[in-house]
């Protein structure tokens, strides 16, 4: 760390870089789905093979099933024009009626009736059993449920389109049993139709009979109450206008008028007779037609005759003649009799007047009493009207229900269904077999669908990081390079390679895709900082065996191929490996340097294949590696190395295993997190990223290591690889592999 002040900005800048890095996750596209299917192609191939084998087996071993069918026509009852009265809620929806009848044909009760009558629970052909079966009872719950379920599963009931015909079919391995079951279902359905209609009619009749009994009692009670009221009111028959009180009231009204007239006549005759001169009474009496009695008239005639004889005698014989005196005495006697008769007539007129007045008074009194009774009768007539209406209402309801009861049987017959058997079920001649191609294709399609589902399920359950986009989305860090899986060099000159050339691929194959990947990593690191390239580069990983040592050694070689001096430090003091890669002495190294046993010039070892590269091995394994790496001696060493070398590449231990990598990350200008393709899991990498961020480490990005370029995710990732250095140097169109072999030789 020769320039500690100038390195503070590069340390902090990478920590802010991930926050501005865009990791927008794109939606799943068809191409991504195809990549997933290509990656899991062996699952699809296995599923297709299994489906094909299973389809062939199923096609060859499919059972010989016989299907017997019958047809029935179901028609509704008579139309409304033949009904006695309109039925409320009656619907002419034929479709719903037919669906209802189909549901009845599939009902458990009908199936149980068929199973019970045919004893299907003990039928070996029905149970698909070989040989005799033990006798069981259909009343047992489990036996009943299994028998009905088997019967329903093999029975198919459908409606022939645009007709009233229902098709009933049954599938069985026994052709005769299939036909018998269909015929039994049809007969049981017809029988049930009759029984349900009859039972419905019986229920309606019983209900109407019970209602009629109650109504009959109510009618009788209301009639008795009405008749009692009639007798109490004196109403005759059922007409409230003809009653004794009203008749008496009319007669009394007429009698009162006649009595009043008679009283007026008698009073006027009496007053006239009492106020007349006695001599004028005779004439007055005579002038009244029909009032002069016969005795008064006779006396008047005798008196007049006597007066005439007396006048004659008086003129001839004189007043003193005895005959004249006798006549005079007779005249006086007759006058007394006339006077007496007149008085009697006057008294009689008075008596007639008094009688007429008394008659009038009595008649008027009786009329007033009758009027009072008539007023009271009007109030009673209101109660009578209510009683009569109650009686009429109960009688009307009773008669209506009685009529409905009489027509219930006819109505039920009109509403019942008419079921005609169109086709009886006959035993089929040949079984129904599905085409083998159809079975094979269907199983193959379903197996492929299952394989696709399993492939996507395994893809979703796979926590390994395999694509750059996925890693960037999980870590929110940029991808610096994608390093392909390393391949050992082969050829005739392999025996002449040094240990470093055999272990470091960029030295053995400088023109390979592997070397190009590290050149891309070098470029990304050098351009990661805007002011100056990072000097201290720390490479670490989340877990062991992710290739951080390989990445560090190859990156150091690539950095040292220019004019830059590079120092590669093996800071993994627990499991050192760099000295084996380069074939160096591991007895001296970082631990001896930090302990003061050796000096830097004595400890650093040169690589002949890369002159600008120095390697500082780890040295002997110390007892306290973390304390040694966090010591002041380590800080002084890094500061001195920063003054001498252009770049210092540090290989650190996994940060989730030990804390050495986190300690060294504070001293670095750029921290690179190495992730192995397909090995590192999502939560492990995310945890390592979080640990580095919380510690303040300047994370530059990630390197995806050991990528299989033949995998679907990276198909064409290095598509330009055909345009290599060997192709440029070649003067012919010979295959690239041959040219590579010649160059190695």
Image (cartoon, rainbow, N blue to C red):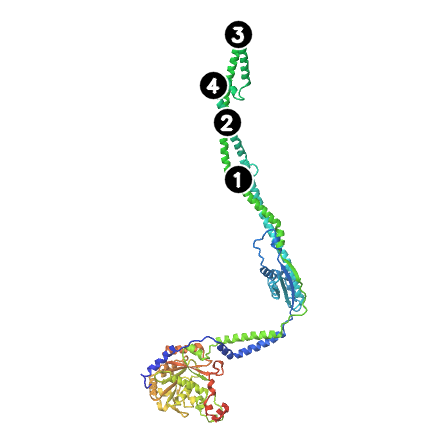
Task: Please identify the quadrant where the N terminus is shown.
Answer: bottom left
Instruction: Measure the alpha-carbon separation of dots 1 and 2.
Output: 38 Å
Residue toward you, 729 or 576: 729
Q: Between residue 581 and residue 736, name the one nearer to us.
A: 736
Structural crowding at the residue carrying mark 2, measured as other residues with C-alpha within 10 Å and reported as few (<14), some (14–19) or many (≥20): some
Furthest-left residue in view?
5
Q: Residue 677, percent across and down? A: 46, 81
Pick the front one: 239 or 124? 239
Using the rendered image of the protein, determine whether residue 485 is visible from the camera's viewpoint: no
Q: Which disc, if any, is residue 261?
A: 2
The tag earlier along the polypeptide, 2 or 3, is 2
Asked whether the residues under the numbered discs 4 and 1 touch, taking CB atoms below 8 Å apart as contact, a structural biologist would say: no
On screen, residue 482 above or below 248:
below
Residue 439 vertical position relative to residue 481 in the rendered view, above or below: above
Under circle 4, the secondary element is loop
Q: Is residue 583 above or below residue 330?
A: below
Q: Which residue is mark 3?
A: 315
Q: Gap between marks 3 and 4, in whole Å?
A: 34 Å
Q: Which residue is mark 1?
A: 384
Q: Looking at the picture, how far across and down is residue 236, in whole percent?
A: 56, 36
Q: Secondary structure at mark 1?
A: helix
Report crowding for label 1: few under 14, some 14 to 19, many 20 or more residues within 10 A (C-alpha). many
Circle 4 residue: 276
- Asked whether the residues under the numbered discs 3 and 4 touch, taking CB atoms below 8 Å apart as contact, a structural biologist would say no
Crowding near the residue tagged with mark 4, few <14, some 14–19, many ≥20 C-alpha atoms within 10 Å: few
- Mark 1 or mark 3, which is nearer the start of the sequence? 3
């Amino acid at each position: 760390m020769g320039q500690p002040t100038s390195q503070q900005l590069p340390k902090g800048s990478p920590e802010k870089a991930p926050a501005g890095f865009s990791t927008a996750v794109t939606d799943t596209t068809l191409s991504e789905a195809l990549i997933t299917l290509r990656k899991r192609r062996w699952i699809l191939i296995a599923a297709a093979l299994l489906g094909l084998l299973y389809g062939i087996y199923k096609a060859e071993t499919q059972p010989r099933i016989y299907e017997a069918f019958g047809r029935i026509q179901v028609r509704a009852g008579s139309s409304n024009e033949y009904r006695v009265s309109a039925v409320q809620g009656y619907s002419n929806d034929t479709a719903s009626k037919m669906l209802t009848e189909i549901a009845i044909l599939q009902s458990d009760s009908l199936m149980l009736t068929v199973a019970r009558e045919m004893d299907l629970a003990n039928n070996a052909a029905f149970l698909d059993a070989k040989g005799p079966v033990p006798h069981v009872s259909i009343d047992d719950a489990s036996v009943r449920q299994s028998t009905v379920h088997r019967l329903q599963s093999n029975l198919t009931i459908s409606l022939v389109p645009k007709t009233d015909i229902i098709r009933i079919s049954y599938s069985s391995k026994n052709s005769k049993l299939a036909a018998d079951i269909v015929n039994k279902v049809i007969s049981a359905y017809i029988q049930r139709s009759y029984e349900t209609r009859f039972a419905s009619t019986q229920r309606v009749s019983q209900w109407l009979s019970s209602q009629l009994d109650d109504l009959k009692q109510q009618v009788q009670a209301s009639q008795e109450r009405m008749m009692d009221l009639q007798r109490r009111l004196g109403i005759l028959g059922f007409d409230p206008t003809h009653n004794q009180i009203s008749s008496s009231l009319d007669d009394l009204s007429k009698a009162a008028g006649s009595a009043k007239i008679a009283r007026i006549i008698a009073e006027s005759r009496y007053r006239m007779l009492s106020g007349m001169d006695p001599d004028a009474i005779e004439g007055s009496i005579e002038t009244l037609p029909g009032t002069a009695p016969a005795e008064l008239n006779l006396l008047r005639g005798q008196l007049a005759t006597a007066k005439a004889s007396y006048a004659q005698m008086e003129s001839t014989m004189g007043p003193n003649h005895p005959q004249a005196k006798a006549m005079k005495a007779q005249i006086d006697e007759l006058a007394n009799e006339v006077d007496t008769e007149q008085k009697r007539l006057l008294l009689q007129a008075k008596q007639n007047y008094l009688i007429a007045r008394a008659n009038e008074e009595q008649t008027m009194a009786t009329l007033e009493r009758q009027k009072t009774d008539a007023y009271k009768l009007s109030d009673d007539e209101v109660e009578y009207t209510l009683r009569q209406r109650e009686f009429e209402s109960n009688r009307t309801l009773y008669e209506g229900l009685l009529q409905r009861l009489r027509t219930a049987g006819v109505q039920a017959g009109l509403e019942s269904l008419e079921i005609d058997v169109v086709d009886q079920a006959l035993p089929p001649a040949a079984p129904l077999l599905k085409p083998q191609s159809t079975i094979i294709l269907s199983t193959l399609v379903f197996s492929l669908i299952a394989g696709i589902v399993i492939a996507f399920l395994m893809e979703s359950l796979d926590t390994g990081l395999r694509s750059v986009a996925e890693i960037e989305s999980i870590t929110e860090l940029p991808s610096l390079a994608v390093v392909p899986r390393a391949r050992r060099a082969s050829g005739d000159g392999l025996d002449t390679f040094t240990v470093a050339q055999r272990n470091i691929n960029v030295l053995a194959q400088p023109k390979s895709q592997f070397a190009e990947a590290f050149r891309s990593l070098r470029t990304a690191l050098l351009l990661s900082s805007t002011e100056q390239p990072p000097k201290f580069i720390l490479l670490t990983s989340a877990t062991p065996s992710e290739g951080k040592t390989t990445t560090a050694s190859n990156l150091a070689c690539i950095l040292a191929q220019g004019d830059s001096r590079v120092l590669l430090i093996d800071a993994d003091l627990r499991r050192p490996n760099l000295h084996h890669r380069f074939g160096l002495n591991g007895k001296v190294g970082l631990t001896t340097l930090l302990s003061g046993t050796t000096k830097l010039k004595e400890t650093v070892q040169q690589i002949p294949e890369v002159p600008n590269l120095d390697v500082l091995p780890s040295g002997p394994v110390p007892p306290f590696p973390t304390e040694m790496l966090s010591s002041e001696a380590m800080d002084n060493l890094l500061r001195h190395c920063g003054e001498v070398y252009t770049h210092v590449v540090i290989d650190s231990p996994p940060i989730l295993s030990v804390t050495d990598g986190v300690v060294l990350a504070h001293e670095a200008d750029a921290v690179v997190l190495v992730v192995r393709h397909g090995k590192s899991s999502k939560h492990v990498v995310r945890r390592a990223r979080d640990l580095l961020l919380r510690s303040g480490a300047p994370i530059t990005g990630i390197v995806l290591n050991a990528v299989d370029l033949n995998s679907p995710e990276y198909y064409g990732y290095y598509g330009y690889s055909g345009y290599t250095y060997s192709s440029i140097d070649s003067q012919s169109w010979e295959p690239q592999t041959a040219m590579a072999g010649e160059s190695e030789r």
